[in-house]
Image: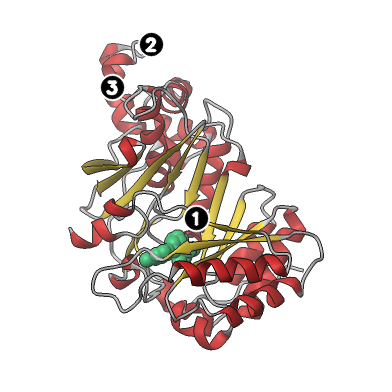
Amino acid sequence: MTEPIKTLPLVFDEPRGRKKPPPHLADYDETGRKKLLTDAGLPGFRAKQLSTHYFARLVDDPAAMTDLPAAQRDELVSTLLPSLMTPLRKLEADKGTTVKTLWKLFDGALVESVLMRYPGRSTVCVSSQAGCGMACPFCATGAGGLQRNMSTAEIVEQVVAASRSLARGEVAGGEGRVNNVVFMGMGEPMANYKAMIGAVRRLTDPAPAGLGMSARGITVSTVGLVPRMLQLADEGIPVTLALSLHAPDDELRNELVPINTRFSVAETVDAAWNYARTTKRRVSIEYAMMRDINDQAWRADLLGDVLNSYGDWAWVHVNLIPLNEVPGSQFTRSRDEDMDEFVRRLEAKGIPTTVRDTRGNEIDAACGQLAATE
Ligand code: SAH
């Protein structure tokens, strides 16, 4: 079933000659962590203690790692737990239950993550690249192009940082933990496939090797890099796949999601169906509602027909996102009555449909605007 991986176009290549982020224990499995220590002339068995501090106890202060010999502590920590990012700014909304952090990476690149707290659960939205090469014209991140891929540890650290804040009761609503991770921050996770999969493994590995999260709580969102979607289906990790479709027809999707000129709507939805069939996981179709662009009733009908041309089980659901308006952009949010009609049409065709609540609207928590203005 899996097709050969097509050669990906140049747009996926990050600029050459960039310095890599420092290696960190979250980049490696347990064997790799031990090797990193022994290569530095340090005892390999310390890797497990450091992993326990990082993933299980969520400790970041070396002074609190009292099971490590004081004389060796700094060297152990700088070898496996180097500082990867510093928070430049934190913005809160929704009475402190939505927290957006702007991070500065080791080389000055800026990325952001968002923690969203709901009754009984918390979701972290992570970035997978600094910038993005996909150039979707309605997205603030797309305008700046790709700076670089993030490392596995840089992706994981966003979740660990949120877990720490929740565990320490620093977020409104009291102590808590991270239940869901969505790859819907800056970047195209499928264009940084290896680091993304590494991060998924670290998030799901049982503690102390990883955070011990359920794969079902993780959502990987993509513009539709078909070869990578096929590859993900064969990984045997039941993460949720979200496909940013935004239009059911090639003519419009070519403009809204330029990669569509390479992988058509039919090829892309085929790959989404393949994912659902292989993993038995319901795929989520993301559709940002843009006034008079993609929100016509006939497009809702067409979207329903396209999705219904596959399995007769509920293999898919549609997530309508009221457009987060980017200043200076020609794209605006759909009228409420048009969104309502769009939902009605999809439901009439039997497609489960939800309208996403717009958390953190006033802090631009949905689309890379903060990093873009910095
Ligand atoms: N590159 C991935 C993940 C990052 S964006 C992807 O495209 O899926 C996460 C979601 O936010 C995508 O569906 C994206 O299309 C959407 N998005 C981007 N800009 C938006 C905006 N201004 N308003 C609403 N949704 C937006």
Q: In the displayed structure, would residue 359 be above or below residue 26?
A: below
In the displayed image of the protein, which residue is found farthest to the front? 337
Asked if the residue at tag 3 contacts the one at tag 1, i.e. Cβ–Cβ closer than 8 Å, the answer is: no
Please tell me in which quarter of the rendered image ligand 1 is found.
bottom left
Asked if the residue at tag 3 contacts the one at tag 2, i.e. Cβ–Cβ closer than 8 Å, the answer is: no
Between tags 2 and 1, which lies in front? 1
For badge 1, the amino acid type reads Arg
> Residue at label 3?
61
- Which numbered disc flags the more N-terminal residue, 1 or 3? 3
Q: In the displayed structure, would residue 221 be above or below residue 13?
A: above
Q: Nearer the viewer, residue 184 or 350?
A: 350
> Residue at label 2?
67
Expressed as whole percent of the image width and height from the top left, the position of residue 327 reads 24, 69
Give the alpha-carbon distance from disc 1 to disc 3, as whole Å: 38 Å
Give the alpha-carbon distance from disc 2 to disc 3, as whole Å: 13 Å
- Residue shown at 46%/28% (left/top)? 55
> Residue at label 1?
356
- Which numbered disc flags the more N-terminal residue, 2 or 1? 2
- Which numbered disc flags the more N-terminal residue, 2 or 3? 3
Expressed as whole percent of the image width and height from the top left, the position of residue 183 reads 47, 53
The local crowd at label 2, few if under 14, some if 14 to 19, many if 20 or more residues have their Cα within 10 Å, is few
Q: Nearer the viewer, residue 75 or 333?
A: 333
Q: Secondary structure at mark 2?
A: loop
- Residue shown at 62%/72% (left/top)? 5
Q: Secondary structure at mark 3?
A: loop
- Residue shown at 80%/60% (left/top)? 313
- Residue shown at 33%/54% (left/top)? 361
Q: Quadrant of residue 130?
A: bottom left
Q: Nearer the viewer, residue 1 or 316?
A: 316
In the displayed image of the protein, which residue is found farthest to the bottom? 251
For badge 3, the amino acid type reads Asp
